[in-house]
Image: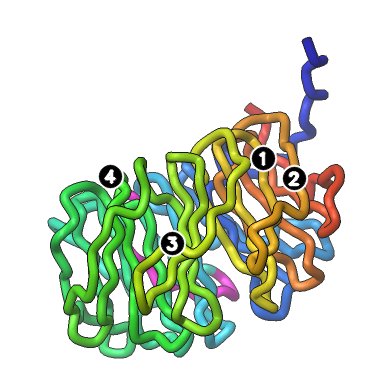
Amino acid sequence: MPPPPPALPTEPDGHRDAVVWLAVSADGRDVMSASTDHMIKLWDIAGKRLICNLGEHKDMARTALFMPDGATALTAGDDGEIVLRKLADGAVLHVFSSGANGGVRKLAISPDGKRAVSGHDTGNVIVWDLVNKSVLHVMTGHDWPISTVAISPDGTRALSGSIDGTLKFWDVESGKQLRSWHGHEQGTYGAVFTADGHHVVTGSGDYTIKLWDLDTFRELRRFEGHEGTVYMLVLSADGKRLASGSLDGTARLWDLGTGNQIAMFDSRTGPIYAVAFATDGTLVTGGDDRTIRDWPAAGGDGEILFAGAPQ
C-alpha cells in the first residue's frame, strides 16, 4: 500500500471547501477562484497572497470569469444569480437573475464582452445581453441539467452539453439550435472551442476527451487515459496544448494535434475540478483538497500556491 500523502498546509484566507473553478487574468498576475464554500476569491500569483474576497453567492459558486475590460468579473452559482462585480473591491454592479431557469451550472462570455451564455440545472441555456443587461434568448431542448457551455472565438456560436451526454450547437444571436448530437456515453463536463472556431473539444463522465469537427460534426480525435470523469478542459494560449482535470485526481496535458499525452500531474488528494494555464505555460489546478496548485509545464510535482482554510 502506498504511504498516505503528507498533511497539507492551511491558511486562514483559503477556501473552506472544494475549488471548482479557476481563471487567470489576461496579464497573468491574478487568479480568480470559485468554491463550493460559496466564495469567489482573487489571488496575487507572484505575491502568493489573497487580494480580496471578491464576493459570496447564496449557494455553491460555480464559475468566475474575468471580463475583457480587465476591471470587472462575472460570477455565477447554484443560487441562480450571475453577478457583475468590480475587481478592485468586489462591489456589485449588476445582478442577472435566472428566475425559474434554475441554478447556473456553467457560464461563458463572448470575447468582446457583449454576450454571456449560461447553462442551468433545468436544462435551459440562456443568452444574455451584457450591454443592455437583459435576456436575449432562453434556449430549450436539453432534457437534463446543463454541465458545460462554451462560446466560439468570434462570439457567434455556442455549445452546450448536459449530464446525459447530449451536445447542442447554437446560433448566439438568433437563439436557433443548429445541431444536436449524442457526443458521449455519460455527461459532458468540459468544452472548449479551438481558435479557428471550427472545432470543439469535450470531456466526459465516460472518461474520454473528444475533438469534434463542427463543419461535419464528426469525431476527429480521442484523448484517452483518464480513469475518472473529465471535469474541466482548457486550451493553452497558442492552441497547441490541451489541459484536463479529472475526478481521478489527475490533471493531464495533451498535444492537441496528435492526441498524445504530454504530462500527468497527480494530486494524490482527490478530484481535480479546475484547470487554467498561467501565462508562463504552467498549469494551475484546484480541487477537492481546497488548495490551488501550480504544476511545471514539462511535468513533475506541483507547488501549493494557496492553501485551503483549516477544517
**235 or 255, which is in the foreground?**
255
Q: Residues within 10 Å of mark 3 (few under 14, many from 20)?
A: some
Label 1 vs 3, first from the N-terminus: 3
Please tell me whether residue 148 belongs to the stretch shown in magenta: no
Q: Which residue is mark 3?
A: 219
Q: Which mark is residue 164?
A: 4
Q: Amino acid at mark 4?
A: Asp
Please tell me whether residue 87 belongs to the stretch shown in magenta: yes
**Residue displayed at 63% across by 27% down:** 311
**11 or 264, which is in the foreground?**
264
Q: Is residue 237 left or right of residue 22?
A: right
Label 3 vs 2, first from the N-terminus: 3
Label 4 vs 3, first from the N-terminus: 4
Task: Decide if residue 77 is in sight here.
Answer: no
State the SS at label 1. Answer: strand
Q: Residues within 10 Å of mark 2 (few under 14, many from 20)?
A: many
Q: Which residue is mark 1?
A: 250
**Residue displayed at 16% across by 70% down:** 138
Residue 7 x %, y %? 79, 24
Residue 17 x %, y %? 55, 37
Q: Amino acid at mark 3?
A: Glu
Magenta stretch: give its range: 77-89
Residue 95 x %, y %? 31, 70
Nearer mark to the viewer, of 3 and 2: 3
Q: Quadrant of residue 137?
A: bottom left
Q: Which mark is residue 264?
A: 2
Q: Which mark is residue 25?
A: none
Instruction: Look at the numbered discs 4 and 3 and tell me whether their residues touch, using CB distance below 8 Å.
Output: no
Q: Amino acid at mark 2?
A: Met
